[in-house]
Structures are given as C-alpha cells and as structure tokens.
Image (cartoon, rainbow, N blue to C red):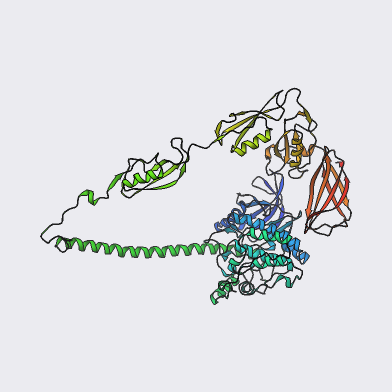
C-alpha cells in the first residue's frame, strides 16, 4: 500500500486510497503536470515478480487505452516506476448504478432510458474498436455528481476474436449471457444481453435470475424464461419492456445485433412509449430454450466449485459480499489466477493439437516418399531388363527427347505499357500469356485508361501460360483549378478553397485603402490556375487603410468560446483559437483575448481567443491569468419552482454582455430539491444576471422557472 504523498512516475502524487481489489489498489492522486486529480490503479507489490500477472495488468490498460468516449472512464497513462506498475485513469466522483438502484428501489422510466442510452453509447464505442466488455453490470457503471454516466472496469475485456472470446473469463453470473455461462463463444451481443439484465433491474429493482449458488443462477440463464418486467412494474411502457425482452433473448440471433440499434430504439421509446416498433424474430427450432447436457452441467458445477460458489467482480465503490467465505481481495486474486491459467491451458492445447497434426503429416509424408522411391526403382529396373519400353519394340531403343521438349518452354514478355486493356490482352495471348489488372496509378506519361506499369518487365523470360500483372493510368496527379476568391471575406474564401479540395491554406495581410478590411485582395496561385490538392494556396487579406473602420474588443472572459467567436465575427473580426488552463473557469470558457479587451482594432483584424481546455493546452505554456484577473461570484438560494415536477433538469446562467444575451450552463442532473443553494461565477464586470431552470419532459426541454441574481467581485 502506497503512503500519502508518494509520487509515481515523477508526476502523480498520491492523495489517498479509494478502493482495493485482489490484483490492484486504486488511489486518488494529483497530476502535477496538468494540475488535476486522477485515479491511479497500482498493481500490488506481491505480484511484481509474476510475469503472468504483469501481462494481465498491461492487457487491461491496453483494452481501455484507445477508448476515448464521454461515457467510458478514460485511461490517460500507463507505466511502471521502480517496480510499481500503474494505470492512470479519469477520476469520476459519484456512485455506482448498483448503489443508486439500492437507494431508490426502482428508477423512473426516463432515468432508466437516459442511463441506458449513455451506457450503450459507451459500449458501442468500445465495440467499434473491437473491444467486448464481458462484465457489464450496475457495479461497473458510475453516475457522476454532474449526472454523467460512465462505464468502467474493462479488466476482462478482450479484442473480438473467436480465438480469444469465451466464457473462461466470465463476469458476474447475475448479468452473464447464456453463451458465457455455457462456456461458448461470446461477442458484442453478449454485452447487449447484460445491458438488458441491467435495464430490467433498473425498472424492477431486482435481478431476473437469482439463487443460492452460482450454478443455480447459471442454469436459470440457460433454461428459465424471463418474467415480464411489467409483472413487477405494472405501469412500465410497452416499448421499453419490449426493448428489454429483445436484449435478453437466449439466442444471440434474436437479440439486437449492435448497440447502435439498442440506442435507436431507446430514443424512439421516449417519443413513442406505447409504440409497437420493437420487432422480435420468430422463435425457430434452433432458438428454443436450451436444455443443457449432463456434461455442460458438470462443467458449470466445476466452475462453481472453482469460484467457491461465487462469481463476483471487484468494484471499489460497492460493499463486500461475504456469502462464500472469501474476502473481496481473496476472490479477486483467484479470479485473475483462473483467467491466466485458462489462457495458458488454451495455448498448451493449441500446441498439443499442432504437435499431433505435425506427427500425422510426417508419418503420411514418409509413406508417400517411400512409395515413390519404390515406384522409381521398379521403373528403372524394369526398363533395364526390357519390361517397360512404352510402345517401342523390344529390339528398339527409346529415343531421347530434345532438351527443348523436356524443359518448360520459355517466352519473352512483350511490352504492354501504353496499350489499352483489350490491346494488351490480344498481344499477351499471342505469346501464350495472360494478364491481370491490380488497380490504378497516376501517370504523367500515359493517358487515363492505358496501361502504365507491368510486371514482369518487357523482355523478361517466363514460362508459357504465365500471367502479366499491370496497373492502369488514372492520368496525371490530380490537379485542381483555383476558384474565384478575390473579393470574398477571409472565411468565405477559405470555405471555397476547401470545397474545391485544397488542404493547405495560408494567409498574409496587407494594408489597402481600396479593399475593405477582411476581404481577400490576391491569391497565389492565381484564380483559374491549377495546383495539386496538397499545394499551399496563399490568400492576401486586406487590413484596410489608415481610414479603415475600427471596433473595440469587448470583455469575453467566462463566456463560451463559440459564443465569443460569433460576437467577434459579427464585428468584422477574424478569430483564431488557442488553449490554456484556468482552475476558476469552466471548460471551453474564454480566459482572455489577444489583443486584450478594450483595445481598438481595425475591422478585419485577427483576434485570438485563449480558451480553457486542459486536454489541448500545452502544460509548459500555462498562464496564471486565473490567479491575477478579477472574478465575479454570486452565492444564491433558489426558492421553490411550482412548475417543476422533479425530472431531469438543467440550470443556465444568462447575462447581458456587450448588448447580447450570453448563456452559460451551470449544472444538470436527474432531480433537483428546493430550496437549492448554488455558487455561480459570472462574466467579470457584469453585476447582474438570471438563472433559468429547464426540465426534460416527454415533449422535450421546457423552461420552468427564473431567478434574478447579483454578482460581486471576489
């Protein structure tokens, strides 16, 4: 266990431990480079000399490292430091879905649907990367304090391959698909089954299959029909119930085939709660309830014994289960060891099969070679004694064939470049050769459609009936005509060039009394000339003359970057974006402008917005503006809103800035209770504003209440 204050990787300072499993401990740590808190998963010291455990730990990091999605707990870094193996992940403050269900008993239809959509979106992103989670359950779904839903713990995920996906590393048996508990092939549709069980638990407050032992629950997944969730929740909408039932079909072919399909139907169920749009495939003979064989039952019993009558997966935010006599950490160690052993067994089995096959092949080959040797000896001896003359009289010798007849006949490859495909085929056939196209290449020497390259080259000697491969010419490298852009604004000209296919556009500025500021006055190459798509196209933009109109840059600190950009462009200014970090502002809020607010500039000038975004900022270039500039704050208590019905909500701050209303989202969540105290940071120098409450309803988002508030400089 690491002590508070320990620094890992010369970057992550341990603040405290937040959870522990059989293989690793999870710590909250401070990232000194990006000045943020993260979760660091550290493999326990006792496994440092075990190469199998190290391999398993690294595989977990690899499974989630490429999954950048708002609904997946992101992995930021992985490494080892003086024997400490660690994974750095996004720190999510909140509770698990399991705890949330236990707290509320049952979830509302809107909550269930909203959470289900976010879970499916995260899993869909994983599936698109070829990763199957294989342990989807409420314990591995976190609801953050701001209402976001994130899937975590890809510890037993694997790349989707028939050689690697099996039930050897099975998740919690309450949520495992029939193919997982049976030990068969599992893919993305196994995750869909687990999502269906999770949706079932959200709307009913209970799991559909339960029992005293793991094997009892596993057999129910294989044989028992799912009770309709409306039995426990009578007012459950028909559409949502049908979605749950389709997700949890025992036959994978009768389930949804992709998570995207589940998302589409969940969204539609919000609009058509009583709709009959969920289509279940007819139950064919091969999709009936599966009766397991005695061997399968024995396999499940064996797995049950190995698991000590428990199939559980570690979750740092859930309570320990003690019904099998093992602690959480002891069980987790056993699970990881079993998984590694299963992998090694599979490898050994493959080696045995290869070895057995090789022995058979060698034996058969030896028989064939021996038979051929005997046959050759018989022919040679027979010819010597005159038994085999192959049609010649016994007194005549057999004539010896010429070298040209005995050897394969060779021909010289003709030159087919510059010919059409029909001409090339005709010429090749004259030489008893074939031709085959491999594609197209650009060529300045041959017109489009003619043969530009061939293999083998002309003049090469090859056997008759060989094939010449070739590439057709697609013409010269793509040349694009420069469109008419002079007289357009900078952004209009840039859009026109990109639409034409150019990818490298540069700008220069030049004073002009004749051309308005911000308007293109020249382009290189000139309009009408041609250039390659990746050639640089340079636009010369007027900055106006000495008498050009000027505007004053307003104070945009704290405003959303897109809103600030729109306001500046409306003044005739060109906007560029750079990124920095500020602890006192929200993501994508403006930190400052360059030139600074209050500066008078010509219309058409370029203004740079410095935007708060730690993921894009250069840590070495971080400014200290958040510590030196003024901050305006309001501490307010919101009274009861009579129109609010307790559904999902969103609070928005509205302030008037430079004559324009500017909205900034403060927070959102699943439910709001009054009176509600809130601290809000506003735009510097603006002393008033209003907080608006919006509620999500079946017909969309509706404004419910408004509270005027005042700000003071802090």
Say how many tags the image has.
0
Residue 312 visible within the image:
no
Give the vertical position of 190 relative to 598 (above or below): below
Residue 226 visible within the image:
yes
Q: Residue 285: x percent and y percent?
A: 56, 73
Quarter containing the C terminus: top right
Q: Residue 110: x percent and y percent?
A: 75, 61
Quadrant assignment, res 574: top right
Q: With 260 as the anchor, is 205 left or right in this view? A: right
Which of the two residues, 203 or 711, is positioned nearer the viewer here?
203
Quadrant assignment, res 621: top right
State the residue at coordinates (29%, 62%).
Answer: 369
Which of the two residues, 357 or 534, is positioned nearer the viewer here?
534
Residue at the outermost left position:
395
Q: Residue 415: x percent and y percent?
A: 35, 40
Quarter containing the N terminus: bottom right
Which of the two residues, 383 or 231, is positioned nearer the viewer here?
231
Give the vertical position of 525 relative to 173 (above or below): above
Q: Residue 40: x percent and y percent?
A: 67, 52
């Amino acid at each position: 266990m690491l002590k508070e204050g320990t620094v890992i990787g010369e970057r992550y300072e341990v603040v405290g431990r937040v959870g522990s499993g059989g293989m690793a401990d999870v710590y909250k740590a401070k990232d000194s480079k990006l000045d943020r808190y993260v979760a660091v998963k550290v493999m326990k010291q006792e496994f440092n000399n075990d190469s199998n455990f190290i391999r398993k730990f690294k595989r977990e990091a690899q499974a989630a490292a490429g999954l950048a999605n708002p609904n997946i707990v992101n992995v930021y870094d992985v490494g080892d430091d003086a024997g400490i193996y660690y994974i750095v992940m996004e720190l999510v403050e909140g509770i698990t879905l399991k705890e949330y269900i236990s707290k509320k008993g049952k979830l509302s239809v809107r909550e269930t649907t909203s959470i289900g959509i976010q879970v499916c979106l995260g899993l869909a992103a994983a599936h698109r990367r070829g990763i199957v989670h294989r342990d989807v359950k409420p314990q591995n779904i976190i609801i953050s304090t701001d209402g976001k839903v994130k899937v975590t713990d890809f510890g037993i995920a694997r790349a989707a391959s028939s050689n690697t996906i099996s039930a050897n590393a099975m998740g919690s048996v309450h949520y495992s698909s029939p193919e997982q508990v049976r030990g068969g092939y599992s893919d993305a549709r196994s995750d869909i089954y687990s999502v269906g069980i999770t949706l079932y638990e959200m709307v009913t407050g209970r799991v559909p299959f339960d029992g005293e032992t793991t094997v009892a629950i596993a057999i129910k997944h294989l044989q028992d029909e799912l009770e309709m969730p409306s039995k426990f929740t009578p007012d459950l909408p028909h559409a949502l119930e049908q979605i749950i039932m389709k997700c949890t079909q025992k036959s994978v072919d009768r389930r949804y085939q992709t998570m995207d399909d589940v998302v589409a139907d969940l969204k539609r169920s919000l609009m058509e709660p009583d709709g009959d749009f969920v289509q279940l495939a007819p139950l064919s003979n091969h999709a009936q309830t599966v009766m397991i064989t005695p061997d399968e039952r024995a396999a499940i019993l064996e797995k049950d014994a190995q698991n000590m009558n428990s199939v559980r997966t570690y979750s740092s935010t859930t309570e320990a289960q003690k019904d099998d006599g093992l602690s959480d950490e002891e069980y987790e160690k056993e699970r990881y060891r079993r998984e590694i052993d299963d992998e090694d067994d599979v490898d050994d089995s493959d080696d045995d099969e290869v070895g057995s096959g090789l022995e058979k092949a060698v034996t058969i080959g030896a028989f064939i070679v021996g038979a051929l040797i005997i046959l050759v000896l018989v022919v040679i001896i027979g010819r010597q004694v005159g038994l085999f003359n192959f049609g010649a009289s016994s007194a005549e010798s057999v004539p010896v064939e010429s070298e040209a007849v005995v050897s394969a006949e060779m021909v010289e490859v003709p030159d087919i470049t510059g010919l059409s495909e029909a001409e090339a085929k005709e010429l090749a056939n004259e030489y008893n050769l074939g031709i085959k196209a491999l594609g197209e290449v650009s060529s300045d020497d041959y017109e489009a459609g003619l043969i530009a390259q061939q293999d083998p080259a002309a003049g090469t000697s090859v056997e008759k009936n060989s094939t010449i491969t070739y590439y057709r010419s697609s013409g010269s490298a793509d040349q694009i005509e420069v469109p008419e852009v002079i007289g357009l604004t900078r952004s209009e000209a840039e859009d026109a060039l990109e639409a034409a296919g150019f990818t490298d556009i540069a700008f220069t500025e030049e004073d002009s009394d004749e051309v308005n500021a911000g308007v293109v006055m020249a382009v290189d190459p000139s309009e009408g000339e041609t250039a390659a798509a990746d050639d640089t196209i340079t636009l010369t933009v007027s900055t106006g003359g000495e008498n050009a109109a000027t505007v004053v840059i307003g104070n945009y600190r704290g405003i959303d970057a897109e809103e600030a950009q729109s306001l500046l462009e409306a003044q005739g200014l060109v906007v560029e974006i750079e990124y920095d970090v500020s602890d006192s502002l929200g993501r994508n809020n403006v930190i400052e402008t360059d030139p600074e607010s209050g500066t008078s500039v010509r219309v058409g000038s370029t203004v740079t917005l410095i935007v708060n975004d730690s993921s894009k900022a250069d840590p070495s270039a971080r400014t200290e503006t958040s510590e030196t500039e003024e901050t305006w704050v309001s501490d307010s208590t919101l009274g009861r809103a009579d129109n609010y019905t307790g559904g999902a909500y969103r609070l928005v701050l509205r302030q008037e800035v430079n004559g324009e209303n500017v909205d900034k989202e403060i927070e959102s969540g699943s439910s709001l209770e009054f009176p509600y105290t809130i601290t809000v940071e506003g735009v510097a120098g603006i002393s008033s504003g209003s907080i608006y409450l919006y509620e999500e309803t079946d017909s969309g988002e509706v404004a419910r209440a408004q509270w005027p508030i005042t700000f003071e400089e802090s």
